Amino acid sequence: MSTNPPSGGHVIGRGIVRDLQWQVEGSTHMNVCRFRIERKNAQGKQLPAVPVEMRSMSFSGTLSNGDWVELSQKWTPGALLHPHEVVNLTTKVPFKSTLGVANTFKAYPRLMKVMAVIAGLIFLAVVAGFVVFAISAHNSFTQLTSSIANGGHPPAENAAFQLSSSSGAPGSSIRVSGSGWEPHEIVVFRYGPEDMGNATADGSGSFVNQLIRVPADATGFFKTIEATGQSSVKTISQPFTVIIASAASPSCRSYAGPNGERISVTPTVATRGQTVQVVGSGFPANAVVGVEVEWPTGFGGGIQVTADNGGAWVGRLAIPPTAPLGCDAVAARFHTTALVVVVAGLTVTA
C-alpha cells in the first residue's frame, strides 16, 4: 500500500471511525494509532474506506470507534493517510499529534531513532511545566494497555440491539432493547453524528425498552442508527428511515368543514396498528360521523361516532396495517344537505 498519495484524488470529507488500534513501536517508543474511516455519499452509497495511521509521542483529544470525524485532505484509493490532525465531530475536540511526529521518517530508520531520542529529551524537559502533556500521555497509555489486555479484539462480540420501529419522524421517540454487551456498560445511540440517547446494560449485558429520540433536525440523509458501547467500543447498526412529512403533499394537510367543523389527531405520528384519538368539534348536534384513515390509493380502519348536543365527539381509530408510510390523512364524513368531509394530517411509520 502506498504511503505517499499523489497530489490529485478526492477530498475525504466526513466519516465514521472503525477498527481503531493502538500500538507502541519498539524501536522508537512512538504511540501508533491506526484506524479506517467509513464514508457514504449523498445517496447513502458506501464509499471506499480510508486507512489512516498517526504516529506521535503523545496525542491530544480522544478518538473512539464510532466517532464521527472529518478530514479536509485529498486521498487516492490504495494510499495510507498520515494526517497530523483529525477533526472529531462527536467530541467537538480535535484529535492530533502533540509531540515527536514520526510519519515522514519511516524511510530513514537511523534518522528516526535520533529524532525519537531528541523528542524524548524534549518531552522530559517540558513535562514539569506543561501538565497537559503528562495528562495526554497518560490517556494514550491507558487506551493502549486496554487494547493490549483485550488481545487486540474488542469485547461484546455478540452485541445486538433491536428497534421498536424501523422508521420515525424527526423528534419522535422509539424504544431499543439489546443483549450481548459488557455488563453495566453504557451504550450510546447515534443517527449520523447526532446523539439519540443511551441505554445502560444490566449485569448480563442486556437492556429492555429503553427510550431514545430521533433528532428534531433529522433530514433522512443517514439510513441507520448506530449503537456504540463505551467500555467495549463495539459499534453495530440497524437500518432506520426518517419519515419527512412534506407540506406540499395534500394528504398531510388539514381541512376544516364549510361551517368550521374541525378534527384533531393525537398523536400526529403513529405506527401501523397503533390506536390514535380523534377529536371533533363544531359539528351539527347529534350528527352521525364516519371516521377512517385514507391515502391516495385506499382507506381503512373505519369507525362511526355521534356528536353530542354541542357538536363535539371523541373516537379511537386503529391505523390499518396496509396504510402506506409517510403522509396519510384521517377523514371525517357526515351528511347535511350534502356530504361534508373534514381532514386532519397524519404521518404513518412502520
Image (tube, rainbow, N blue to C red):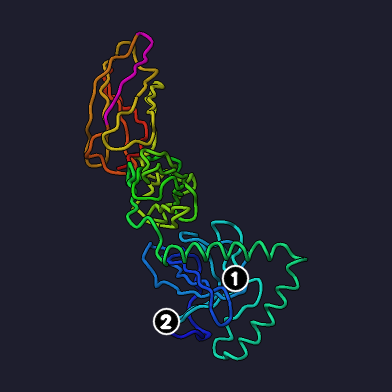
Q: Position of residue 233 (x, y in %)?
A: 45, 57
Q: Which residue is mark 2?
A: 78
Residue at point 38%, 50% (across, down): 181
Q: Which residue is mark 1?
A: 85
Q: Examine the structure image and report whether residue 316 is included in the region drawn in magenta.
A: yes
Q: Quadrant of residue 164?
A: top left
Asked whether the viewer can see residue 337, the reply is: no
Is residue 331 left or right of 282 when viewed as pictured? Answer: left
Residue type at mark 2: give it: Gly
Q: Look at the picture and state if 345 lies above or below 157.
A: above
- Name the foreground residue: 313 vs 181: 181
Q: Tag on residue 5?
A: none
Q: Main secondary structure of the magenta part?
A: strand
Q: Position of residue 58 (x, y in %)?
A: 62, 70
Q: Which residues are magenta?
A: 309-318
Q: Position of residue 314 (x, y in %)?
A: 34, 18
Q: Examine the structure image and report whether residue 281 is included in the region drawn in magenta.
A: no
